[in-house]
């Protein structure tokens, strides 16, 4: 009962040892019961405190089993819950000292007593609450790591209770955890402090006050002096985040740390950092990320930081995707520092999340940029091998991914990695350049922008040190087919050269003296770094780009050129051999666009340097023309054209012999493309020197054409040359050339040459048709009776020439051509008429695809139909063949427009034939042109089209005309399938609603068919019969009369007339199809039916 606690502690130590001596163990129950009773019920504080000491000593001396044996814990728990203030305080004293003296042995009973202890925190008596606080502190200091794990859930569960007193008790317990051992403290604080900060949002002031006290209690155990000095600011930031977070972060930034950060320090700092990275302000996010990244370098053990990763990492990921670049950069570096300090195995999902964000199509460009920057820092933290492995195996293969967002992500990585990795990136330059260049030509604008950005970063960071790797790719990009790649390559090349030369790209329009001096210095520096040969090659490519077909490329090339070249003519003279070689290579590339660019560049060189460059350029082009392949020869022609266009007349005359010979040989080249380009070159030369070039080239070609020795294809080459010249100067050359080609007898070679000439002069050769057509026709007439093999070859060549001429002439010459041919069809000489008809046939066949002669079809029909009654059989056959060609090569829909004209022509022809001297008069006349196998085939499709699809007028003309054709054609050439082919359309259409005139014409023609067809039409008797009987009831008298006549013609073919008689009898009584007619009309129909019945009975 001594008030001195030290005395009580000493006595307790002795008692603990005495409990095992003598007979004292037998009195153990009595001693423990007495001490427990005094502890709970005594009025004196000293008695209660001393009894608690004694109880703890007695239990220790008796063994831990006595707690359960004598119900000590149960009685203490009951006293805490139901006793008065004195009993509660005494019970808490006992729990405190039991825990203190027994240590880990008492830990299992702490869990059972914890609810009672929590309740004591909210007691109304101050002494009870003080005792609870002291007891909690002792308990926490004695807990093992396992004990902390057991206690923590119960405390946290109490924190979530709605009663404020229970929540306050939980907070007191959480605060008491500051008494835990350092190892246990480090494990529990990551859960404790967030709960305490959560309490500041509670509505009850005492809960908030308790939370603040608990944080202050935790801050008291901080061993780091720098953090200890900032503890008030940190606690303030946790209690009032809106006003204290920025201040706390700024204080942490400004503090110079000399000591390692311990676990309690982390417990206060991390919640502040969490609030910083989740803040709306950019400064707070940047400070939070910066401190979080540096934290790993200041903590004593990385394991202390591990529990806080789940708290900080989501915030850092969010900051990494922030719209502000500086914030993203800080977050990326923070992630790199975390990986470097903790190891990537501590953040297993971080890299995969970064790559997924990089590839994802959900996020924006900003988010992909942040993910790329974060991935860059994370990879660098893992080491160079990790960087190379991930880039080559995971990132760069995505450059051809179908999604634009993924391709963009790859380029964002290439934007940040070169500068961040430094010289270690050298090994990745070659694998990265293809992805960069393909990105520059990407169809997506955003991808192109990022590719350009990454390219500029690469050039700035590694261009000077590794130009030998970058420069060849950029030079190749200058010749790429895609203009976007050429522009981008020029921009990057400008950055590289300005970086090497130590100048900035000059985008101004005016060159100042300072700009010129800078360009001089830059060119000198470039020569020192690249070497003279590389410098000349690069400048040559750059100068070529100034002549590009794309305006944007030309503009970019001009800007870069002005930046590094001060005096263009001087530089051109310096690089001229290399530049000319480059130009010739492009001229020989076979690529049309590159050839054009090289030609323009050559012209520009000639324009700027004039006499100085021609002696060097022209011999090179001449040698390339004779030694190169067809692509080289084509390029040379383009180059010569540009040289001639930009050189002065005096300069051209100096080299006229070389130029004329080169152009002549190119005109005669076996390659059509070379000849076409050489023709343009010839045109340019003609423009400069006039007819002199014609006088020197054409006679030589004509002499070669007349050469009898063609071992070296001299004739063919000469013909190629002439046709090439004619393609550009036909009006000047045709009057000179055609008479020589038409000299009789026309040889096969001349005929072939004329055909070749016509193939390239279609727009102007028609002027000479009045000479060409008569000459060719006369030659064909002269060869008509020849049987020699040589003449046969000549005839075949002439006919081929005719076909070529007819197929080559342009639309403007069609009327001239037809007029000339038509005039020969009416010649007095039958051979001329025959060949004239043949020429019309060839004309139709040759112009089929162009369809530009349809307006002249009536003219052709006039000449050809009139020849169907020619006295010469060969003329008739030729005319028939031409008509057949017209029918096959022009659609019936077009030809039916001339059907009335055709009918009138035939009627006129037949009438003239009947009435002329020696004619048959009214007797039977058979037109020779139709009385041959398939004689009616040229006209039959036209008449069928008119009958089936024409309007009423056309149908009448077509039906009547067909009947007239049948009359002048013998039965021999109508029999069989031919007559059947005519019958079908007429039978199908006669029943339609046609005017009486059309019906009369159709029925008449059907009657004629019956006369000509005879027994061959027996299968059609039922259809004829139905048609004619139906016509008997037609309102028109003319139709009824013709139907009656037709029935008379049908009778010889009918085998059964009983049904017909029965039908006619019925109709005559008014019971047939005419029953509904009016009285007058019905009588007329009945009369016609009776007349038909009479005819049937007479002829049946």
Image: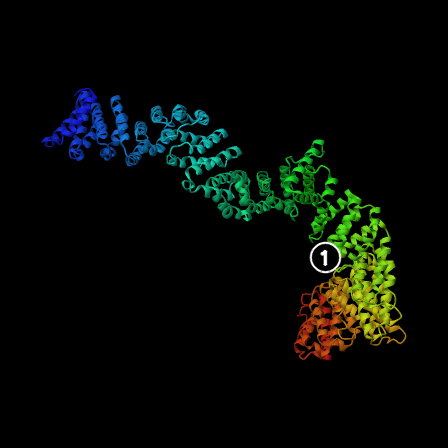
Few, some or many residues within 10 Å of mark 1 (<14, 14–19, 20+): some
Q: Residue at x 62, y 37 (%)?
A: 499
Front position in the image: 655 or 199:
655
Q: Is residue 332 left or right of residue 810?
A: left
Query: 836 above or below 94?
Result: below
Q: Is residue 998 left or right of residue 100?
A: right
Query: 366 above or below 706?
Result: above
Instruction: Quadrant for residue 1014, please give it.
Output: bottom right
Q: Which residue is mark 1?
A: 630
Can you name the residue that lies furthest to the right here?
917
Which SS class for mark 1? helix
Front position in the image: 315 or 470:
470
- Image location (x, y in percent) of residue 42: 17, 22
Instruction: Quadrant for residue 739, please give it.
Output: bottom right
Front position in the image: 136 or 813:
136
- Image location (x, y in percent) of residue 58: 16, 29
Front position in the image: 1060 or 467:
467
């Amino acid at each position: 009962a001594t008030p001195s606690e030290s005395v009580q502690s000493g006595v307790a130590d002795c008692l603990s040892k005495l409990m095992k001596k003598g007979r004292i163990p037998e009195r153990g129950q009595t001693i423990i019961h007495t001490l427990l009773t005094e502890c709970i019920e005594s009025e004196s504080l000293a008695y209660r405190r001393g009894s608690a000491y004694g109880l703890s000593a007695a239990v220790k001396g008796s063994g831990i089993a006595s707690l359960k044996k004598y119900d000590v814990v149960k009685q203490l728990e009951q006293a805490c819950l139901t006793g008065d203030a004195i009993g509660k305080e005494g019970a808490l004293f006992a729990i405190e000292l039991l825990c203190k003296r027994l240590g880990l042995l008492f830990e299992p009973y702490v869990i059972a007593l914890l609810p009672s202890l929590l309740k004591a925190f909210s007691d109304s008596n101050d002494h009870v609450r003080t005792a609870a606080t002291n007891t909690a502190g002792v308990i926490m200091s004695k807990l093992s790591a396992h004990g902390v794990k057991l206690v923590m859930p119960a405390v946290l569960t109490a924190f979530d209770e709605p009663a404020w007193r229970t929540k306050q008790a939980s907070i007191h317990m959480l605060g008491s955890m500051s008494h835990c051992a350092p190892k246990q403290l480090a494990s529990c604080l990551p859960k404790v402090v967030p709960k305490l900060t959560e309490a500041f949002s509670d509505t009850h002031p005492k809960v908030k006050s308790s939370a603040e006290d608990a944080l202050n209690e935790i801050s008291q155990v901080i061993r780091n002096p720098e953090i200890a000095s900032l503890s008030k600011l940190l606690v303030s930031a946790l209690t009032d985040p809106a006003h204290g977070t920025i201040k706390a972060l700024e204080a942490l930034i400004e503090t110079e740390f000399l000591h390692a950060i311990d676990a309690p320090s982390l417990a206060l700092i991390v919640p502040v950092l969490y609030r910083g990275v989740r803040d709306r302000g950019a400064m707070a996010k940047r400070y939070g990320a910066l401190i979080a990244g540096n934290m790993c370098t200041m903590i004593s053990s990385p394991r202390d930081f591990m529990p806080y990763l789940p708290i900080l990492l989501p915030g850092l990921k969010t900051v990494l995707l922030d719209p502000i670049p500086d914030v993203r950069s800080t977050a990326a570096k923070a992630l790199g520092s975390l990986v470097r300090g903790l190891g990537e195995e501590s953040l297993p999902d971080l890299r995969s999340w970064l790559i997924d964000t990089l590839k994802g199509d959900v996020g924006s460009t900003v988010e992909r940029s942040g993910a790329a920057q974060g991935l860059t820092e994370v990879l660098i933290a893992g080491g160079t091998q990790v960087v190379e492995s991930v880039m080559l195996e995971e990132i760069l293969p995505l450059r051809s991914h179908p999604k634009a967002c993924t391709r963009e992500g790859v380029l964002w990585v290439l934007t940040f990695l070169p500068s961040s990795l430094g010289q270690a990136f050298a090994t990745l330059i070659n694998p990265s350049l293809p992805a960069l260049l393909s990105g520059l030509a990407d169809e997506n604008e955003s991808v192109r922008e990022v590719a350009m950005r990454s390219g500029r970063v690469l050039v700035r960071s590694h261009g000077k040190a590794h130009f030998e790797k970058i420069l060849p790719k950029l030079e190749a990009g200058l010749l790429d087919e895609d203009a976007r790649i050429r522009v981008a390559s020029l921009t990057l090349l400008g950055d590289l050269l300005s970086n090497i030369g130590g100048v900035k790209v000059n985008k101004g329009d005016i060159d100042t003296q300072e700009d010129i001096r800078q360009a001089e210095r830059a060119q000198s520096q470039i020569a020192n770094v690249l070497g003279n040969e590389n410098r000349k090659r690069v400048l040559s490519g750059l100068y070529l780009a100034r002549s590009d077909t794309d305006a944007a490329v030309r503009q970019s090339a001009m800007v870069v050129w002005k930046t590094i070249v001060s005096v263009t003519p001087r530089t051109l003279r310096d690089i001229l051999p290399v530049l000319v070689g480059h130009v010739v290579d492009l001229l020989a590339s076979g690529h049309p666009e590159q050839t054009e660019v090289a030609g323009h560049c050559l012209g520009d060189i000639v324009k700027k340097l004039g006499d100085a460059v021609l002696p060097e350029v022209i011999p090179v082009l001449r040698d390339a023309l004779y030694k190169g392949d067809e692509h080289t020869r084509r390029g040379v022609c383009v180059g010569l054209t540009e040289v001639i266009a930009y050189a002065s007349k005096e300069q051209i005359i100096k080299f006229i012999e070389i130029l004329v010979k080169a152009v002549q040989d190119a005109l005669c080249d076996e390659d059509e493309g070379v000849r076409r380009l050489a023709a343009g070159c010839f045109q340019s030369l003609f423009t400069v020197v006039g007819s002199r070039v014609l006088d020197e080239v054409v006679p030589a070609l004509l002499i070669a054409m007349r050469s009898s020795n063609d071992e070296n294809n001299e004739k063919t080459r000469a013909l190629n040359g002439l046709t090439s010249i004619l393609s550009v100067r036909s009006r000047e050359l045709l009057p000179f050339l055609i008479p020589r080609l038409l000299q009789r007898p026309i040889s096969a070679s001349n005929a072939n040459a004329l055909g070749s000439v016509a193939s390239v002069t279609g727009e102007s050769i028609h002027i000479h048709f009045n000479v060409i057509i008569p000459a060719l026709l006369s030659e064909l007439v002269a060869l008509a009776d020849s049987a020699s093999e040589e003449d046969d070859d000549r005839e075949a060549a002439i006919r081929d020439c005719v076909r070529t001429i007819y197929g080559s002439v342009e639309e403007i010459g069609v009327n001239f051509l037809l007029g000339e041919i038509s005039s020969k069809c009416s010649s007095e000489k039958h051979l001329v008429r025959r060949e004239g008809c043949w020429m019309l046939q060839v004309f139709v066949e040759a112009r089929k695809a162009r369809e530009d002669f349809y307006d002249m079809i009536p003219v052709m029909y006039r000449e050809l139909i009139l020849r169907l009654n020619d006295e010469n059989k060969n003329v008739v056959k030729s005319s028939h063949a031409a008509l057949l060609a017209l029918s096959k090569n022009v659609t019936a829909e077009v030809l039916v427009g001339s059907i009335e004209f055709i009918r009138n022509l035939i009627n006129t022809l037949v009438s003239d034939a009947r009435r002329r001297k020696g004619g048959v008069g009214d007797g039977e006349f058979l037109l020779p042109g139709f009385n041959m196998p398939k004689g009616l085939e040229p006209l039959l499709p036209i008449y069928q089209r008119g009958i089936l699809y024409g309007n009423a007028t056309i149908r009448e003309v077509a039906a009547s005309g067909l009947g007239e054709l049948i009359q002048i054609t013998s039965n021999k050439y109508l029999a069989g399938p031919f007559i059947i082919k005519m019958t079908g359309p007429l039978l199908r259409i006669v029943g339609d609603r046609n005017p009486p005139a059309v019906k009369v014409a159709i029925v008449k023609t059907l009657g004629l068919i019956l006369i000509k067809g005879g027994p061959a039409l027996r299968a059609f008797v039922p259809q004829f019969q139905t048609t004619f009987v139906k016509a008997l009831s037609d309102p028109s008298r003319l139709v009824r009369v013709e139907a009656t006549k037709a029935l008379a013609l049908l009778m010889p073919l009918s085998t059964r007339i009983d049904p017909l008689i029965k039908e006619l009898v019925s109709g005559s009584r008014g019971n047939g199809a005419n029953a509904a007619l009016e009285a007058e009309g019905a009588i007329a129909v009945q009369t016609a039916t009776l007349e038909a019945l009479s005819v049937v009975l007479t002829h049946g």
